[in-house]
Image: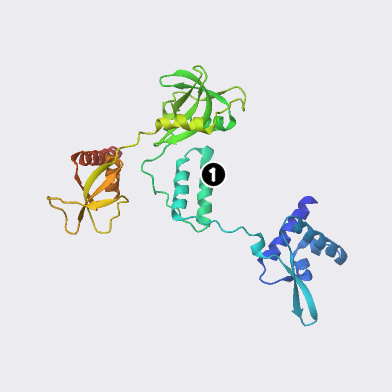
Amino acid sequence: MAAQRSERLVNLVIALLVTDRPLTRAQLRDMIEDYRRVSEVAFQRSFERDKEELRRIGITVESVTLDTFFGDEVGYRIPRADVELPPVQFTQAEADALATAARVWRESVLDESSTSALVKLRAAGVEPDTEAGIATQVVTGADAPSFSDLWRATIDRSRVRFGYRGGKKRTVDPWRMALRRGRWYLVGRDVDRDEPRLFRLSRISSAVTTVGEPGTVTSPEPEVIEAHLNRLEPPEPEEVDVTMAVAPGVRLGVMTTRAEWDGPVPEGYEVVTGGFGGYDEAATAVLRAGGRIILLAPEKARTVLADRIQAVLRLEEDAS
């Protein structure tokens, strides 16, 4: 009976939501099977109970007086604005960030959720750029076959054991998994050494097994874990000045000043000097411009750029 009533309530809500005009009791009785199968008196009682139940859960059935040839009649409707959630608005940058996050999850333990999230974004009219902002392909499968087991153990707060760097067994209380510079790491307490350690997943050399019961691992405060993960971050690079010839319409994203240059530059290009957080950052800006920026000086910056280009060419040769 409970299932039948729930179905009737759902049908009533749908009928009163999709209509473009208020519906009379007679029309509702004709549309909903449960109402048709009972007497008029039973229908009236059932309809009143259903309205009260909907009101109790926050859905108000609105009564509207209708003009008819035979006098006033009451119609019913549910204003859509009263029950619909406001649409979630994402900027293009936010949608791209969500798409980027979804591309990270390659393992089956997370793939279904990330795929569902992308489907919902597209259904809402937002087309995420799934290629934006990814400089390197993040791989969790072949690179880290232990990913799924460690992920589940971290969620379950279960102690784990695995071989690491040549087969030496490590027993670890997992605290968190983190992605740093395209690689997955596990941060946790090395039980044998009784100290916090970082483990790169690609260096795990055996299957991961759980030890003991779930819920036995206690993690420290998030600030403590972050402090250990920060050891993976490179030091802040010193700002360097780079001289470039820039095509019209190209935006560098850094402050620039006009510069003098004695050598030849393409017609229409402007010679500028800009400050970057290291030569790698400058090389990235040049590569992203797709040939519309020429890196002129210093020589060290040109060497870094040449090395980056050679690395890409070697990858293409290996793939062919």
**Label 1 residue SS:** helix
Q: Quadrant of residue 86?
A: bottom right
Relative to 5, residue 22 above or below: below
Choose between 229 and 204: the one closer to the eye.
229
Relative to 301, residue 144 above or below: above
The image's colouring method is rainbow
Which residue: 78% across, 66% down?
Answer: 29
Percent position (x, y) of residue 202?
Answer: 42, 29
Q: Which residue is mark 1?
A: 113
Q: Is residue 96 visible?
A: yes
Choose between 75 and 320: the one closer to the eye.
75
On screen, residue 40 versus residue 141, left or right, reads right
Numbered marks: total: 1
Q: Callout 1 environment at 10 Å: few (<14), some (14 to 19), or many (20+)?
A: few
Choose between 83 and 1: the one closer to the eye.
83
Percent position (x, y) of residue 8?
Answer: 75, 58
**Hey, what amino acid is under mark 1?**
Ser
Percent position (x, y) of residue 179?
Answer: 44, 36
